[in-house]
Image: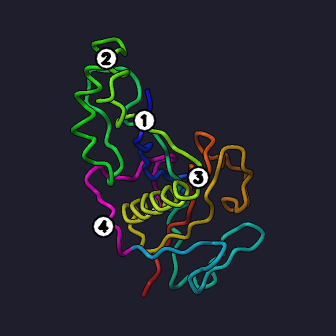
């Protein structure tokens, strides 16, 4: 048995300046990547929007009249084909959305056959497998950025600063306001999780 799908990703708040629950999942099921295409992306290690800087691991806004920090966000990874159940499969990543239709019957058949169906190749496209080769890492980073852009859009921001791509066991490189925070990546894979700051920048 093998797999050739990817884990799905959702944007989640870690700390939010506007009233909201901690660890709130922001991604709306009907929001597509292109809906957040207008979100401007910066990477803390290479570029920053004018009016902000990092000092001692803390994001500082120099132009508060023009820039608002809305939230600090991350990504949550989950297995859309996880567990035995009689329900539909959870949504797959947008670039694998055809599996939403293909994998729901396979999930049902896997459940009623107590796992025997999983050994047939019909279900193999439904099982997520993440690898650590360069092409897979770059593709995963792209999906992580798309996911954080969706989070920024849902929060009403127009800019996201990607502060870190993390792996399980990595220590924080850019902290959340300098305070303690669990920033370990998920599933022990390179670039398994991303963090970023959502800003509203007046143009």
- In the rendered structure, which disc, 2 or 3, sits on the residue that comes first in sequence? 2
- In the rendered structure, which disc, 2 or 4, sits on the residue that comes first in sequence? 4
Residue 96 part of the magenta segment:
no
In space, the residues marked 1 and 3 are separated at their CA atoms by: 16 Å
**Nearer the camera: disc 2 or disc 4:** 2
Helix, strand or loop status at disc 4: helix
Q: Mark 1 and mark 3 in contact? Answer it, CB < 8 Å.
A: no
- In the rendered structure, which disc, 2 or 1, sits on the residue that comes first in sequence? 1
In the displayed structure, does residue 183 sit left or right of residue 97?
right
Q: Mark 2 and mark 1 in contact? Answer it, CB < 8 Å.
A: no
**Image x and y of residue 130, in percent:** 51, 44
**Nearer the camera: disc 1 or disc 4:** 1
**Nearer the camera: disc 3 or disc 4:** 3
- In the rendered structure, which disc, 3 or 4, sits on the residue that comes first in sequence? 4
In the image, residue 203 above or below residue 33: below
Mark 3, residue position: 133
Residue 29 part of the magenta segment:
yes
Q: Which mark is residue 3?
A: 1
In space, the residues marked 2 and 4 are separated at their CA atoms by: 35 Å
Which residues, given as a range, are shown in magenta?
18-38
In space, the residues marked 3 and 4 are separated at their CA atoms by: 27 Å
In space, the residues marked 2 and 3 are separated at their CA atoms by: 32 Å
């Amino acid at each position: 048995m093998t797999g050739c799908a990817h884990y799905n990703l959702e944007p989640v708040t870690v700390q939010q300046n506007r009233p909201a629950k901690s660890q709130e999942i922001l991604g709306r099921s009907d929001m597509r990547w292109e809906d957040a295409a207008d979100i401007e992306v910066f990477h803390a290690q290479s570029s920053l929007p004018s009016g902000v800087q990092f000092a001692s691991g803390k994001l500082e806004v120099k132009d508060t009249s023009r820039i608002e920090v809305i939230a600090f966000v991350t990504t949550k990874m989950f297995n859309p084909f996880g567990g035995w159940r009689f329900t539909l499969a959870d949504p797959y990543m947008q670039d694998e959305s055809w599996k939403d239709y293909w994998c729901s019957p396979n999930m049902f058949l896997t459940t009623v056959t107590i796992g025997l169906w999983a050994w047939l190749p019909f279900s193999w496209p439904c099982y997520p497998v993440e690898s650590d080769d360069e092409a897979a890492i770059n593709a995963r980073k792209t999906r992580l950025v798309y996911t954080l852009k969706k989070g920024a859009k849902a929060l009403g921001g127009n800019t996201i600063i990607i502060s870190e791509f993390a792996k399980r066991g990595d220590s924080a490189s850019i902290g959340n306001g300098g305070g303690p925070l669990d920033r370990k990546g998920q599933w022990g894979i390179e670039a398994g999780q991303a963090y970023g700051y959502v800003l509203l920048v007046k143009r």
